[in-house]
């Protein structure tokens, strides 16, 4: 028999309270006589005809085991639920499944998620990053806008983007029109250099991203001499920001910058996401991804990047520079560790370039 709705149960109890014949009420609602009597008795005892809470299926783990499971996964964040289930014996020597472990952890608001990826930070790195953030936390807008933030980045034609989703039915995961094909090495790619800060932004194509690495002399000839030196000659009290890649820290590069009276901002090692231009690369890649049809060759990619760079509004750059105080505060809050800005840094680009530490 179908279950009665709450309104039907109340009507049945009302008919009994009004003196109606119980059998007639049972027939009217197509229920057994005992069911109608049970509704009436439940209403007398609880004031409601709703079902009482049932005990449900007995839990296979005890409360003590639940606490042990939670502590274990708080100490071992990357262990799987199936591993924990194999090492846990439930009540009455019953085996536990991984789904049971996941439910116990979900009850304590512990969810299984993809981990954020970041560089390996030693205690020395964390201390240097925290000290740098404390030294610059009180900088104002005028000081930050005098910094020329620079970086190189490699853009690829083919890349796997976690933001992309596909509409498919059950069993269509490997259908040709549901598979996102990509080259294992990224396909045609270009290496570019850019700088944002006071005044215009710079963009320079450095050619293919692989097989033609950036050397210190190439960095001087193609970037510093044609772009950075004229920029600093036209403006006073400006500072150059660059990371600790080997072409930047080479003695020939340092001598060139010193000869041209270009001040360099001290930068902590393994701190790419402190640089706002990293998020600018992300915006640039998003604009290229929106092109339909997308670029197919390195020349097309180069042209698309130049067009996208020229169409990013200045307000977007100002917002990134305004975020420097928040970035410093985020580093201080975690004592030099990883910050939420890590999840955006180069989120849609090719994997991070491995840059040498000082």
Image (cartoon, helix red, strand yellow):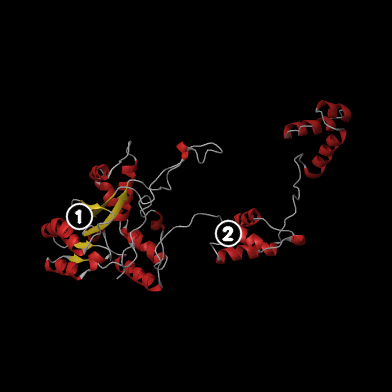
Closer to the camera, 37 or 112? 112
Along the polypeptide, which appears first: circle 2 or circle 1?
A: 2
Residue 272 visible to an observer of this rendering = yes
User: Above or below — where is 141 with respect to 258?
Assistant: above
- Quarter location, residue 59: bottom right
Give the tally of numbered discs.
2
Q: Residue at x 33, y 53 (%)?
A: 279
Residue 166 visible to an observer of this rendering = no
Q: Which residue is mark 1?
A: 198
- Quarter location, residue 140: bottom left
User: Above or below — where is 163 with respect to 168?
Assistant: below
Q: Residue at x 84, y 36 (%)?
A: 35
Closer to the camera, 156 or 347? 156
Q: Secondary structure at mark 2?
A: loop
Q: CA distance from mark 2 to mark 1?
A: 49 Å
In the shown orientation, is residue 304 left or right of residue 77? left
User: Above or below — where is 234 with respect to 268?
Assistant: above
How packed mark 1 is, by other alpha carbons closer than 10 Å (few <14, some 14-19, many 20 or more), is: some
Report x, y in % for residue 165.
45, 42
In the shown orientation, is residue 31 left or right of residue 225? right
Q: Secondary structure at mark 1?
A: loop
- Quarter location, residue 110: bottom right
Q: Residue at x 60, y 65 (%)?
A: 72
On-image quarter of the N terminus:
top right
Report x, y in % for residue 144.
25, 59
Tag shown at residue 104: none
Q: Nearer the viewer, mark 2 or mark 1?
A: 2
On-image quarter of the C terminus:
bottom left
How packed mark 2 is, by other alpha carbons closer than 10 Å (few <14, some 14-19, many 20 or more), is: some
In the shown orientation, is residue 336 left or right of residue 96? left
Tag shown at residue 80: 2
């Amino acid at each position: 028999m179908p279950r009665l709705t709450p309104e039907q149960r109340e009507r049945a109890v009302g008919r009994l309270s009004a003196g109606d014949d119980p059998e007639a009420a049972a027939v009217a609602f197509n229920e057994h006589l005992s069911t109608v009597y049970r509704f009436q008795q439940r209403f007398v005892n609880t004031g409601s005809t709703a079902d009482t809470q049932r005990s449900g299926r007995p839990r296979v783990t005890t409360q003590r085991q639940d606490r042990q499971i939670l502590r274990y996964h708080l100490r071992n964040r990357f262990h799987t639920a199936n591993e924990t289930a194999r090492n846990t014996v439930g009540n009455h020597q019953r085996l536990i499944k991984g789904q049971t472990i996941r439910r116990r952890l979900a009850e304590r608001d512990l969810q299984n998620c993809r981990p954020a990826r970041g560089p390996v930070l030693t205690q020395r790195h964390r201390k240097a990053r925290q000290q740098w953030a404390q030294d610059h936390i009180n900088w104002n807008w005028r000081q930050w806008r005098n910094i020329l933030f620079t970086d190189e980045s490699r853009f690829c034609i083919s890349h796997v983007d976690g933001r992309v989703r596909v509409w498919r039915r059950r069993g269509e995961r490997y259908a040709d029109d549901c598979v996102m094909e990509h080259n294992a090495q990224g396909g045609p790619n270009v290496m570019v250099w850019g700088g944002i800060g006071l005044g215009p932004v710079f963009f320079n194509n450095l050619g293919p991203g692989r097989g033609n690495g950036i050397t210190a002399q190439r960095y001087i000839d193609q970037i510093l001499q044609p772009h950075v030196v004229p920029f600093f000659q036209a403006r006073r009290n400006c500072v150059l920001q660059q990371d600790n890649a080997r072409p930047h820290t080479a003695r020939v590069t340092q001598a060139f910058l010193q000869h041209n009276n270009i001040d360099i901002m001290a930068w902590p090692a393994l701190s790419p996401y402190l640089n706002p231009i990293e998020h600018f690369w992300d915006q640039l890649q998003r604009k290229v991804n929106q092109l339909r049809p997308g670029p197919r060759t390195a020349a097309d990619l180069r042209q698309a990047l130049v067009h996208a760079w020229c169409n990013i509004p200045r307000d977007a750059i100002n917002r990134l520079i305004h975020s420097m105080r928040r970035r410093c505060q985020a580093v201080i809050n975690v004592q030099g560790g990883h910050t939420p800005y890590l999840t955006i840094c180069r989120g849609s680009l090719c994997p991070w370039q491995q840059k040498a530490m000082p």
